Image (cartoon, rainbow, N blue to C red):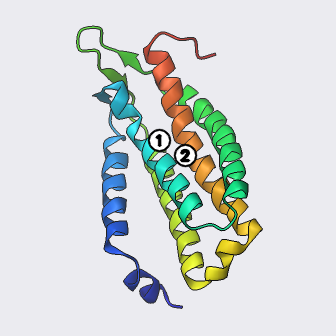
Amino acid sequence: MSFATIIAHTPIWVWFLLAYLLYGGIKALQPREMTWLRMLLLPILFLVWGLYDIVTVLHHPILALVAFAGGIVIGGAIGWLLAAHQDAAWIDPASRLIHRPGTPVTLILILIGFICKYALSVALAYHADLAASPDYNVLSGAIAGAVDGVFWGMTGRQLNQAFGGKTT
């Protein structure tokens, strides 16, 4: 299996998704302002993507869901700590928009998450029997959960900061 073969057999929607994710990651390099609902878009996108694969592709969804939940918890803690090393988010009382600091972390996480999901999908495409492997189910769930957890942790800390919560 060559790299060119893998790329050629990748559905076009995957490249559109990557372009959208990269666009958002590049925008996140600069400080920006947004609603709290908009802040939840990326964590929700990765949550839906992870859960969709678990329930539609894997043969041991309970194992994968348990691993996903564990990954969310661990990733959430990591994301919370990563956000502690950035400038604090704050809310503009007049516009009610949240000001988020610029960071390369979002772009890096998007790339890591996409590459992991892509690699797992390619492995599954070439070895369909992996969907029945408990080890693969746990690995897939844990990776998806951890990546999404980091997004939830960072977003949660920034929302906490913006709405006046203590973050220590």
Label 1: how many Cα within 10 Å (few below 14, some 14–19, many 20+): some
Residue 43: mark: 1
**Coordinates of residue 40 in the picture (x, y in percent):** 41, 35
Kindly report the distance in space between the C-alpha atoms of the residues bearing marks 2 and 1.
6 Å
Which numbered disc, 2 or 1, marks the residue that appears first in the sequence? 1
Could you say which quadrant of the image residue 116 lies in?
bottom right
Quarter that holds the N terminus: bottom right
**Amino acid, disc 2:** Asp
Indicate the secondary structure of the residue bearing disc 1: helix
Q: In this rendering, does residue 26 appear at all? A: yes
Indicate the secondary structure of the residue bearing disc 2: helix
**Coordinates of residue 129 in the picture (x, y in percent):** 67, 81
Taking 26 as reference, is 127 left or right?
Answer: right
**Amino acid, disc 1:** Pro
Taking 109 as reference, is 71 left or right?
Answer: right
Label 2: how many Cα within 10 Å (few below 14, some 14–19, many 20+): many
Q: Say which residue label 2 marks.
A: 148
Quarter that holds the C terminus: top right
Could you say which quadrant of the image residue 42 lies in?
top left
Q: Residue at x 37, y 47 (%)?
A: 25
Q: Residue at x 24, y 9 (%)?
A: 94
Q: In this rendering, does residue 104 appear at all? A: no
